[in-house]
Image: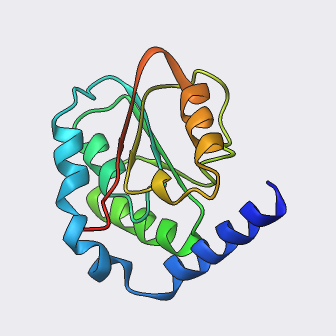
Amino acid sequence: MAGVEHERASRAREVWSLGDYERVGARWAQAPRDVVASLDVAGQAVLDVGCGTGEAALAAARAGAAGVTACDPTPELLAVARDRASAGGLSVAWDEGEAQELPYPDASFDLVLSTFGVMFAPDAHAAAAELVRVCRPGGRIVTTAWTPD
């Protein structure tokens, strides 16, 4: 990752690790569940990029995805996600990683999902290329973002 992008990514990790993400994120918590509910994820290999505390990944696991993998650059958020999965008896592979440098082989997932995650990537073009790279041919890439309003 280039110097400027690395600095932005470091600042973003710091910001997300400082506060009470669950309280701040409560406003948008239903959206990841709604997105997953609108998709047929049963039997699919799902990747949640920028997973935060795991809302979409956990919803995919509950909906019968064949395997759920989730990544986020912020260890503190991943710790919350792991605890939530454990409490719910759900199996999700949690990895620390950046959207613009995903740690997965090409064509690994049927569904690559990012609800309010990849929008924070320091290099949007590199992140988009990575989503495409790890998605299987014929697979789906689904993202959400909020607007300044």
Residue 87 vertical placement versus 102 (above, below):
below
Q: Quadrant of residue 139?
A: top left
Q: Quadrant of the C terminus?
A: bottom left
Front position in the image: 130 or 2: 2
Question: How far across and how far down the image is residue 125, in percent?
Answer: 61, 41
Residue at the outermost bottom position: 19
Residue at the outermost right position: 3
Count of residue discs: 0
Residue name at image x 63 percent, y 54 percent: 98
Question: How far across and how far down the image is residue 25, in percent?
Answer: 30, 72
Color theme of the render: rainbow
Question: How far across and how far down the image is residue 49, in percent?
Answer: 49, 48
Residue 41 vertical placement versus 127 (above, below):
above
In this rendering, would 144 be left or right of 127? left
Residue name at image x 36 percent, y 48 percent: 57
Residue 114 vertical placement versus 17 (above, below):
above
Q: Quadrant of the N terminus?
A: bottom right
Question: How far across and how far down the image is residue 144, in percent?
Answer: 33, 48
Residue at the outermost front position: 149
Front position in the image: 137 or 83: 137
In this rendering, would 140 be left or right of 8? left
Residue name at image x 26 percent, y 33 percent: 64
Q: Quadrant of residue 21?
A: bottom left
In this rendering, would 128 be left or right of 62? right
Q: Quadrant of residue 147?
A: bottom left
